[in-house]
Image (cartoon, rainbow, N blue to C red):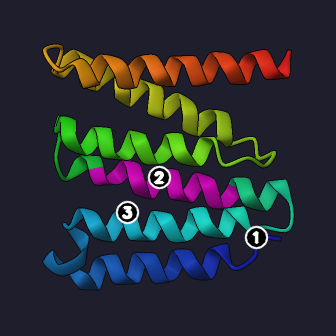
Amino acid sequence: ASGGLGAALKVFESERRKGGFEHGTTTSFYFDCASFFFERARFASDPATAAAFQEVALQIITSVLELGLEDPVLMRLVAYRLQIESESGGDSDMLPVLSEVALSLFDRVKTLRPEEPQSCRDFALALAAKASRMAGRG
C-alpha cells in the first residue's frame, strides 16, 4: 500500500550516509529528495499513501534546518515549499500539517527578522491561506 515508500526511504538513507559532504550536508540534496517524495504523494493511488509520502517529505525537508540552525533564509525556503505543497490539493491528512509547519516557520522568521517587511508579509499570507482553507471546510 505504500507504493514503494520503504524502498525509496532506503535509497534516501543510503545516499545521505554515503554522500558525506557531497550530499548529507547540502541543502539541495534535502530539497531534491523532499521534492521526490512530494511528487510521489501527488500521484499516489489513495490518500493514505499520499499522506505517508508527504510525512516523509516533511521530515526530510525540515531536517535541512539542522544544517543552518536559526537561518531565516533557509527557514523561509522550507516554509515556502511546505506552503506550496499544502495548497497542492488532494485529500491527504498531511496537508494541514504541512501548512501548520510552514506557518510556524514563517512566524519564527518574523521573530528573527522583524525589520524585514517580507517576514511579516509571508506570515500574514500564510495566516490568510489557513483562514481561507478553514472557511472552505466550514
Residue at disc 2, secondary structure: helix
Q: Residue at x 40, y 20 (%)?
A: 123
Q: Residue at x 35, y 64 (%)?
A: 30
How far from the left and from the top, in percent, is residue 29?
Answer: 31, 71
In this rendering, position of residue 43 left or right of residue 27:
right
Position of residue 123 relative to residue 22, above or below, is above
Q: Which residue is mark 1?
A: 2
In this rendering, position of residue 17 left or right of residue 126:
left
Residue 59 - label: 2
Q: Is residue 60 magenta?
A: yes
- First reached walking from the N terminus: tag 3 or tag 2: 3
Q: Hey, which quadrant is residue 13 in on the image? A: bottom left
Q: Residue at x 16, y 39 (%)?
A: 71
Q: Hey, which quadrant is residue 94 in on the image? A: top right
Position of residue 103 relative to residue 51, above or below, is above
- First reached walking from the N terminus: tag 2 or tag 1: 1
The span picked out in magenta is 52-64
Residue at disc 3, secondary structure: helix
- First reached walking from the N terminus: tag 1 or tag 3: 1
Q: Residues under labels 1 and 3: Cα distance?
A: 21 Å
Amino acid type indicated by mark 3: Phe
Q: Which residue is mark 3?
A: 31
Q: Residue at x 86, y 61 (%)?
A: 46
What is the chief secondary structure element of the magenta stretch?
A: helix
How many numbered marks does the figure carry?
Answer: 3
